[in-house]
Image (cartoon, helix red, strand yellow):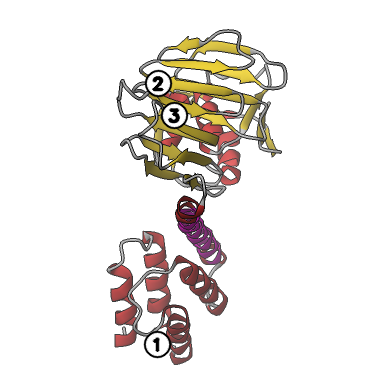
Amino acid sequence: MNKDYEKILDFIYNHPSVPDDIRVTIRQWMLDHQDDPELSSSMLALWDREFGKDCDTFNPAALTRLLNDISLNNGSSTKIGRFRILRIIKYAAVVIAMCLSAIVTYIAAGSSEENKTILITAKGSTGEFTLPDGTNVQLNSDTKLTYNSESFLADGKRRVSVEGEAFFDVTKDAEHPFVVKLTEMEVEVLGTSFDVRNYSFSSKEEVVLLTGKVKVEGKDIKEPVTIHPDQRLVFNRSNGDCNVEETAAINYCRWIEPRLKLENEPLGDLLITLSRKYSVELDIAGNVDLDKRVSLTLHNDDLEDLMPVLSYLTDINYRIEDNTLYIN
């Protein structure tokens, strides 16, 4: 391999933020075309254009353009190779969205007259953040969390608002209860771990408790409701109904894991996990056997790619429409 290629590879392998799949793709492209002077020159020209000859930072937007150009110039690639590159380009686009989210957060925190900090995740990506009190929060796809950065620890209560879905592992502070504001409800805790869901496309607001204890209030809830571990509270904005049910809370919280290996899992539990991981509502017909057992490993698969496999394994029919996964 020529020395110019080695310089590029040295840059890639010394930047941990470059995903492994992308390292392999670029390296394989170089190996495949190192004896073709025209394509070698093309690769070097693309690299210099996107990154500069003396660059020292990783730019995900430039990388996406580079991968796209590689796929176009790689005339000998197989159908599988082209498909794989397109998937990697899509992955790089998610990286860019997360970077843009960080930029938006910084701007919102520094420019708002109310000293608001806004944490945002793009559709199809998740994000993990630490709040000023040390509380860990993980945001699911297409979610916004807002809090007042100036008064967060100064007021009697630590207040945040959520549009979308978030999992909290709250730092204990008896003098400053932690309050999460949804559209119609408020969830108050001292120190616990729980999930809230409040998407605009859904008529429901949900609280699922993993550990500890939380109190839920709302203008249309007659009196405060206290829920305990492995309970789920669902408030229906369309009719004002508020119900608490026993459940396996872990099924509603596993979306925070980047890789899930599910062994001999009931289909019903698996579908709940998918609904949270992919931010969709579930509509399951009454004749579906939810006790059927399934083993499956979930990583960064698209729901559209995963469902045909699940359908084959479990003999179910499905369709995805308007943020809802229909199963029959």
Between disc 2 and disc 1, the foreground one is 2
| Mark 2 or mark 1, earlier in chain | 1
Quadrant location of the N terminus in the rendered image: bottom left
Quarter of the view holding residue 127: top left
Residue 315 place in picture, x, y as percent: 61, 29
Q: Secondary structure at mark 2?
A: strand
Q: Is residue 239 above or below residue 136?
A: above
Determine if the magenta segment contains residue 102: yes
Q: CA distance from mark 2 to mark 1?
A: 64 Å
Write down the residue under mark 2. Answer: 189
Residue 186 place in picture, x, y as percent: 52, 23
Q: Crowding near pointer 2: few (<14 within 10 Å), some, many (20+)?
A: many
| Mark 3 or mark 2, earlier in chain | 2
Residue that lies at the very extreme toward the top in this rendered image: 223
Quadrant location of the C terminus in the rendered image: top right
Q: Is residue 324 left or right of residue 123?
A: right
Numbered label attached to residue 35: 1
Q: CA distance from mark 1 to mark 3?
A: 51 Å
Q: Secondary structure at mark 1?
A: loop
Q: Is residue 36 above or below residue 184?
A: below
Numbered label attached to residue 253: 3
Between disc 1 and disc 3, the foreground one is 3
Q: Crowding near pointer 1: few (<14 within 10 Å), some, many (20+)?
A: few
Examine the rendering and report whether any part of residue 71 can be seen.
yes
Residue 102 place in picture, x, y as percent: 45, 54
Quarter of the view holding residue 201: top right
